[in-house]
Each structure stands twice: as structure tokens, then as C-alpha cells.
Image (cartoon, coloured by chain):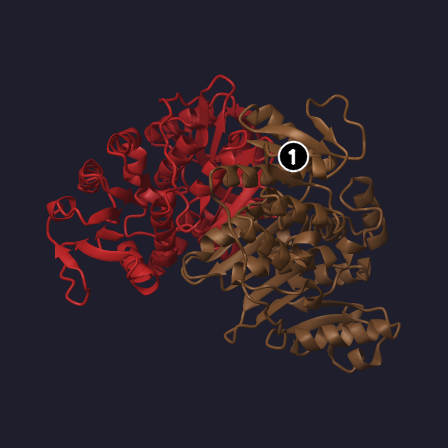
Chain colours: A brown, B red
Amino acid sequence: MKIAIMGLGVVGRGVYDIITSRFAPEIEVKTILDLLPLEELHCIHAKSIDEIVNNPEIELVVEAMGGLHPASDFVLKALQAGKHVVTPNKQMVSTIFAELQQAAAENGVKILFTPSAGGGIPWLYNLVRTKRCGGIEAFRGIINGTTNFILDSMEKSGADFADILKEAQRLGYAEANPSADIDGIDIQRKCAISSNLAFDVQLDPARIDTAGIRRITGEDIRAFRENGLHCRLLCNGEKLPDGKICAYVEPVLLKEDAMEGHVPANFNMVFLKGPEVGELGFFGQGAGRYPTAHSLVEDILDIRAGLGYTGNGPQAEIDNRSAVHAYYVRTEDPALRAMAREPFGPGFLTGPVSVAEMHGAVRAAEAAGHETFFAAVRA
Amino acid sequence: MKIAIMGLGVVGRGVYDIITSRFAPEIEVKTILDLLPLEELHCIHAKSIDEIVNNPEIELVVEAMGGLHPASDFVLKALQAGKHVVTPNKQMVSTIFAELQQAAAENGVKILFTPSAGGGIPWLYNLVRTKRCGGIEAFRGIINGTTNFILDSMEKSGADFADILKEAQRLGYAEANPSADIDGIDIQRKCAISSNLAFDVQLDPARIDTAGIRRITGEDIRAFRENGLHCRLLCNGEKLPDGKICAYVEPVLLKEDAMEGHVPANFNMVFLKGPEVGELGFFGQGAGRYPTAHSLVEDILDIRAGLGYTGNGPQAEIDNRSAVHAYYVRTEDPALRAMAREPFGPGFLTGPVSVAEMHGAVRAAEAAGHETFFAAVRA
């Protein structure tokens, strides 16, 4: 099988290394599309997507460019030219999910994207495999390493958010512009992709209620630890009886015996729930060159073996009114403060509030200039 | 596809329930072999294995009888009659691994045994899938729910071993004769099966150094907790550079941030290590009617889809001399007490000792009538 790699950055280079060291000559990296020079690599250095789509030898394209454009244009061209695609690009997959599935189906090829949610963890793969027997009822978990590193480090060191974020940036766990991670956007996309495969639907990621950890302070963390609670940023997805999907991303306060509270450093751990199998959990590196590249290579091997998955369910509505928790809130916003039941550390605890109501109230508070941190209390 | 179920006990009935409720009529339970009457079930009630092997309609046999005989005789007959087999029977699979693989290969059928190590967790399946890309370097983890329940409950309640064992028996987590679980024999078998698939070898399970938790006391646990340590019974497997396998089962003392120390109740969690993917962990129910039956049904679906795995490596030697730890030991045995470096709770800590040496010394102590509990200290 001859393949092309689009984008020879961190992950693209990882795929090149694994394929050439472990699978050549059965799998050959024929062409690389990248703006930078690649003198030392034994393959064609393409300057244009046309050199890939017009080469009938190439059966499969690895998209490792990231971002929405031009990655999605190139991927659609590759699918339309009858080439399989594998990609870790969560922004692209979550944004144009239906279009990608349709283009693959119309051209008799596959698009697999296992590392787009979970990095090196075979999360999406196992979600699809488990679904065969009775479907998936719900999923939840830690699916972003940057924010888990920040929360775990704040707990263990007592340091404040800004200092730990700098440390994460120094270690390469956080981007120079960390917004996609710390505001939960990265998790929102992964939550959409996981829902699409788990529940056979298509969700608009922008409609998933999402809160991050930008506002958390060392004082919050100290209050949590004094009460035996761990704070983690979790994604949640559940199929409701009426076919709507409950899907949201928010910080959660976990009791001492919850597994998620002990996921260390930049690791991820995601759980699914099935009717007979109960809870299954999947732990590993959610990012990084070789874990992500490993997962892309697994996708390539699956396509080569005639395996893989498709996701082509109907658009589904998100309804977060039935998920109800007590929340920890720290804010100066009067409307939110009116929800206080009892003081807790630098903030307060509410009574039971729905996810829809709480996220709406916090968006209104932030829009009014009242900086707010909140976290659900896991019953 | 028409199938037969041999043994309508806890797991066999679970498979019957899932197949008839979710997969009929595409998959049909045609025949059940059981000594008890089955009036209410719509299938043939066979009294002899011949009624299954001589029925050309039956493509696949679910072995859910347990034990070595007559289960293995019936499974070999089924394979020789050209019928696929799925089984959760760790005793049978670990004891006659090569014979089963050979019978399946010679007759052009498959034998899958995913629940034999991990119950409802797709552990063996993911081990084989991950292996495709660079092999498996090592695995370790909690793969017995009974002993995890006992250790977790002793930690949380402060109660002593005998009381918690009774509670586990009352809840159905431990057998009336608990030896296979508490002495580590169940884990020894799962460790052999995991090694066989991970490293493409065949291990004699009886040669895996194995220690259980029969001797642990509430006083031991209190000393561990006072030092911030959790005790768990772990399996370990590693491929050595010379092709030998390091494989052993022993209690381990884990620091507060180790994931295994927080696996609750009767859950299991097993980790693999691959060259590029790093650590992956798999969490779930390692036993129980519906989790185990779910995993058997997944095996049936894989066979129906033409998938599955084989394990046909050469016999390999076990060598536990290179795995070296400090140990906690509590004993009156003079030879073991001579290894003491410093006192620790009701026992003492040794310096670095190899697994081979420590297990040998403890077997000698027990043979001399000196009851001994020991646990490795994870560095």
C-alpha cells in the first residue's frame, strides 16, 4: 500500500517514522505534502494537493496538517479522488462530520479518525466495537491532557493557575495560545465526535454547553482538597429516551474514590456505559507525537485489512435540561449568588440545578463582566 | 448463524439472554447442552456433546461449563467437527493453549477467549490489536475482582481479612472455596493467557511465580495506609531481550498517585506498554454474568465478521531473576528475617531482591510451616 502524508509536523513525522521503521516496504510513504524542505526523506516532496490526488498509486492519505482550512479542502479532494483518509484533526472532523462521511461513502472509501478523540487511546475504536452489542448508553471522562495536567499539578503543588499554565507551556503540554484547551473547546469537539459515533447522530459541537478552567484559583483547589474533593474537567454524553442527546463539558468535583480524580499529569481516561457490559474505562496518552501517530497507524492497518467504521446518523438536538447537579460557584454575579444554598471555601454551593440552566446563567454572568468559576458536585 | 451453548450456568444464561434479545433471528441459539431441565427455552436440549458436533447447522459453540474436564474434551470435539468456539474458561485455555490453537488451525475454525482474562474488559482484544504496531513490551495490572474487593474493603473499613472474605462470599464476589482467587491461581492463568497473546509464546502457567493475599492482616493494611501506600494484587508480564518472559503475580505496595491503588471494589484495570503508544489502561468488570456474556457475544460477532486472533508462538522460558524490588515481609522464618533492612509496621523491608529469589524463599518458608505475607514495594 502506498500512502501520502499531508503535513510533516509533530504527528506527521511520527507516522512517517513508524511506517518506515516498522511497515516498509509493505506500506510505503510515497509522497509528503509540506511547505518546508524535506531533503533527507526518501519520498516525493509534493508542493500541491494535486500531486497526491492525481497519483493513482496512492491509496491512502494521512492528514496531519491540523486546522479547518486548507486541511478540509485537501481531505475532501482526496476522498473524491477515491483515496482513504486517516486524520487526528478534531476541529475538521467535528465541524464537517456529515460532509466527510458522505464524501467517503459516495466514493467507496473510508475516513477513520480514531486519534481525533483520545489521541493514543483506542477510545473511538472501542466505542464503536462495544456499540455492536446493545448500543452505548452514556460516556464521560477526561479527554484533554493539558487541563488534566494543570488541575493535577495545582492539586499536588498548591501553585496557582497562571504559574502551572506557564509550566505546562514550557513542557509542551499547552499551546502558546491555550484557549482551545483551557476554555474546553478541544473537549467540546471530542465530545461531539464521541457522541456522533456512540449514539449514531450528528451534533453541532458549538451547541454543546462547555465550560473550562480559565477562572480556577489555588484558593478554589485548597477548598476542594480540604473537603476531600478532586477537580477534573470532564466531557459527558448520554442518549435520552426521546432520542435527544445530553452532552456537556464542565469541571466536576469528585469524591476521593472516583477513578477520574486520580488520572495523573497529562493522561486521559474515558468511560463508556453499555447495557450489559456496564462501565468500561480507557486510559492513556491523549496527545503527543508517537501515541497519536500510533493510533493513526492503527487506522491505516484497519483500512488495509478492510475494517473501519462509519458514522452517518441524523442531526440530533442537544438537551441538557434533565442533567441536574449541585454546583460549586465563585462569582460576584447577583443572579448566580441568588442560587447559593451554603457557603463553601471562597464560593458557595447551589441546590440541584440543570446543566442547561447553570451554563446559561454563567454565560450571562460572564457577558455582564462577572468572572465566574463553577464546577458540578458529583453525587 | 446457529450456535450451541454448553453449560447454562451464570455466564451461559447471560449469553442466551443477550443473543435472543438482541441478535435473533440472525444469530439463533439452536441447542443447549446442560444436565438440568430447560423447559422454558425455545431450543433443543441436548444431553450429549454428539448432538452438537453431529448437527451440521451449528457453526459455533459457546463453552460456558468451566473447569478442565469435560469442557476441554467437548471443545476439542467441537473444533474437530469444524465448529468455532468462544469460551471464558481460563483454566482450560491456559492449560491446553497449544492444543486448542492447533485443533482450531487444523480444522479451519477459530477459538476466541477474550473474557478468559479480563471478563467484560476487551483486554485481550486490545492487546492483540495494539501488538500489530511494534509489539507489546510489557503488561501489568489488577485482573481479579475478588482480591481487589477484599483489599479495597480492608483499606476502607479497617476490617480483617476473614471478615471481608465472608462479606465477599455473601455478595457473590468470592467462591465458597476461595483458594483459586485468594492464592492467585486465577491471576496466574490470566497472566499466562495474556503473555501468550502479548508476546507470541506459550507459557506453562504453573511456572509463573505466584503469591496471593491469604496471609494479609488488618495490621499489615494499617501500616501501609499510615505510610500512604495502597496494597493491590498485580499480574506482571514482560518480554526480555533474550526472548525469555518475566511473568509473576504478587501483592504490590503502591504510592498514592498510582492508578491501580484507586481501582474500586471488584473492578479490574490492566495496562499494556507499547513502544510508541506508551501506556494504555483498560478498566471494567472482570467477572459477572452480563459483562462476561457481553465479551463472549463480542467474540461471536467477531467470528461472524471473519475477524479474530490466533496465538501460536513457541514455548518460552520464564525468568524472573531480572525483576528486582524491595519487599515488605512479615514472617517468623529465619532465612527471610535475615533479609530485613529496616522494620516496617508488623514486618520489615528488604533491600532489592529478585522476584525469583523472593518467591523461592517464601515457598521454602511456607513449606517449613512459617506463614508469610509479602508485597513488593513499587519504586
Residue B265 visible in this rendered orientation of the protein: yes
Residue B334 falls in image quadrant: top left
Residue A263 visible in this rendered orientation of the protein: no
**Tag 1 residue:** A4
Residue B295, given in percent of the width and then of the height, sits at 38, 51
Amino acid carrying mark 1 in the image? Ala
From this view, report whether residue B204 is shown above or below residue A189: above
From this view, report whether residue B293 is shown above or below residue A266: below
- Relative to the observer, which residue lies in front, A256 or A294? A294
Residue B319, given in percent of the width and then of the height, sits at 44, 21
Pick out the residue farthest to the top.
B242
Q: Where is the C terminus of chain B found, in terms of image quarters?
A: top right
- Relative to the observer, which residue lies in front, B221 or A1? A1
- At horizontal 80% and vertical 28% (from top left) the residue drawn is A37
Q: Is A373 left or right of B287, judged from the image as shown?
A: right
- At horizontal 45% and vertical 24% (from top left) the residue drawn is B245
Residue B364, given in percent of the width and then of the height, sits at 37, 26
Residue B53 falls in image quadrant: top left
Q: Is A58 left or right of A175, judged from the image as shown?
A: left
Helix, strand or loop for disc 1 = strand
Image mark count: 1
- Relative to the observer, which residue lies in front, A254 or B20? B20
